[in-house]
Amino acid sequence: MLEERLSRITQVVADPSVTAGYCTDFTGRWRGSTPLVVLPASTAEVAEVIRVCAGEGVPVVPQGGNTGLVGGGVPMGGEVVLSSRRLTGLGPVDASAQQVTAGAGVVLAALQRHVRAAGLDFGVDFAARDGATVGGMIATNAGGERVLRYGTTRANVVGVEAVLADGSVVSRLGGLPKDNTGFELPFAGSEGALGVVTAARLRLVPLLEHRATALLGLPGVPAALAALAVLRTLDSLEMAEFFLSGGLRLVREHTGLPAPTRVEHAVYLLVECAAHRDPAPELHALLAALDAPEIVVAADTADRYRLWRYREAHTEAINARGVPVKLDVALPLGELPAFLDELPALAGDAELYLFGHLAEGNLHVNLIGGRDATEPVLRRVARAGGSISAEHGVGRAKTPWLHLSRSPAELAALRAVKHALDPAGLLNPGVLVP
Ligand code: MLT
Ligand code: ZN
């Protein structure tokens, strides 16, 4: 029996009251079921688990912190869940190479604490830092709030260790920045469909001691883009996040926070600069020259986090309002104003909440209730030369529309890679490459 065979290898949970927590995503939109959750504590155990499952033709869904938003880590077909939660090894920080090795189950906030204690930092950061894991971040090529400075997760990974669908292990944790002995396997953005990431060698960045943060109240998105164009001249700019008045109202209802500005504005732009020397003077000089109706400057670290909260609490506030359809799209910056003008009509009778990462043209379109507007919104994004998934991945939610962002030749190549590495289709079936 499968449970018995897997239990001889590692920890296995079959109790439905426990496995239920691995079967539903954060939004409550994706609800699956599983006979077993397997929690290996080493790469060798992952390899053995995969070998046994492959031998019995049992499909497996790899899962990290289960903070995904596109159904990519939920067992929708009754698959076995392979959780990375016990793969929590964290190696010593190599200060001269500016690297660290982390297990796939290391939570982002724990990684941050570990490397910051050694005077370095990890370039990727986002609101789900207390739940999201290194393996999940690699599998989804997570983006977040500092992409404008450090790129997405892919740019912050030196090498990956993973177990392939046949149970073989590929390990590239040596940390050599120069090693052109062929191409790297594309685990970043592979969404658990090509292999199970078990560990990674991560690139670190300097820990910047001085930060300056401001919230701008603006009349519209064109004004936010104009402000961004000016602020981007600062090398120290690290964050440019935006939200709208409707989302702010919802966040305030949910959190009980007071209004961040004297009067309400159509658009809010949250910017942060970071440097070894205090970046406040250069940020404030540029802010003073901007034609912004209202600017609030953070006084200290607690105040910075208070301003972040207005932006970061959007996800939970929207969730508390209802089960959202989450469309994470990106458009060329020049296309944003026209798209945003058309969006309310495209959304129809659904409640629309919008926020995101302005520098990448990355909009989180959240729709609650009403008719499902996924199709018209994604088609409009594609017509504007945008991406139907900027940072959350394809998962199960976006597979029907992947052809809007990828050409037939690209889709054929994706399928060929999937088939070469997982010919029986046992790893995360139905995700990314159906
Ligand atoms: C964020 O930017 O906070 C995340 O992508 C989560 C979300 O889109 O809800
Ligand atoms: Zn985001």
Image: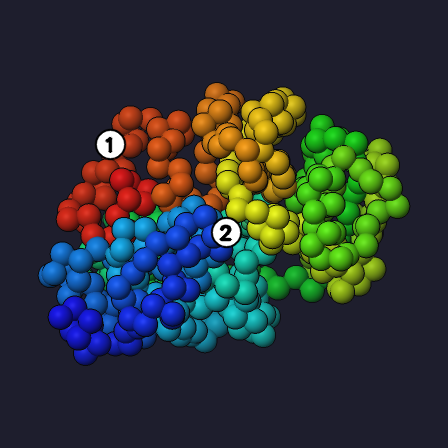
The type of residue carrying mark 1 is Ala
Q: Is residue 125 above or below residue 407?
A: below
Element type at mark 2: loop
Rendered-image quadrant of the C terminus: top left
The type of residue carrying mark 2 is Thr
Q: CA distance from mark 2 to mark 1?
A: 31 Å
Q: How many marks?
A: 2
The residue positioned farthest toward the bottom in the image shown? 8
The answer to whether the beta carbon of the residue marked 2 is less than 8 Å from any atom of ligand 1 is no
Visible in this render: residue 35? Answer: yes
Residue 347 lies in quadrant: top right
Disc 1 marks which residue?
A: 412
Q: Which mark sits nearer the N-terminus, 2 or 1?
A: 2
The foreground one among 293 and 365 is 365
Left or right of residue 14, residue 241 in this image? right
Q: Position of residue 238 (x, y in %)?
A: 65, 50
Q: Position of residue 13 (x, y in %)?
A: 30, 72
Q: Position of residue 223 (x, y in %)?
A: 75, 30
Left or right of residue 191, residue 370 in this image? right
Q: Is residue 254 above or below residue 290?
A: below
Residue 232 lies in quadrant: top right
- Name the residue rendered at 12%, 61% in the picture: 56
Q: Nearer the viewer, mark 2 or mark 1?
A: 2
The foreground one among 195 and 266 is 266
Rendered-image quadrant of the N terminus: bottom left
Disc 2 marks which residue?
A: 27
Q: Position of residue 50 (x, y in %)?
A: 20, 63
The answer to whether the beta carbon of the residue marked 1 is less than 8 Å from any atom of ligand 1 is no
Instruction: Give the image's coloring scheme.
Output: rainbow
* Mark 1 residue crowding within 10 angstroms, few (<14) / some (14–19) / many (20+): few
- Name the residue rendered at 24%, 32% in the picture: 412
- Name the residue rendered at 29%, 76% in the picture: 11
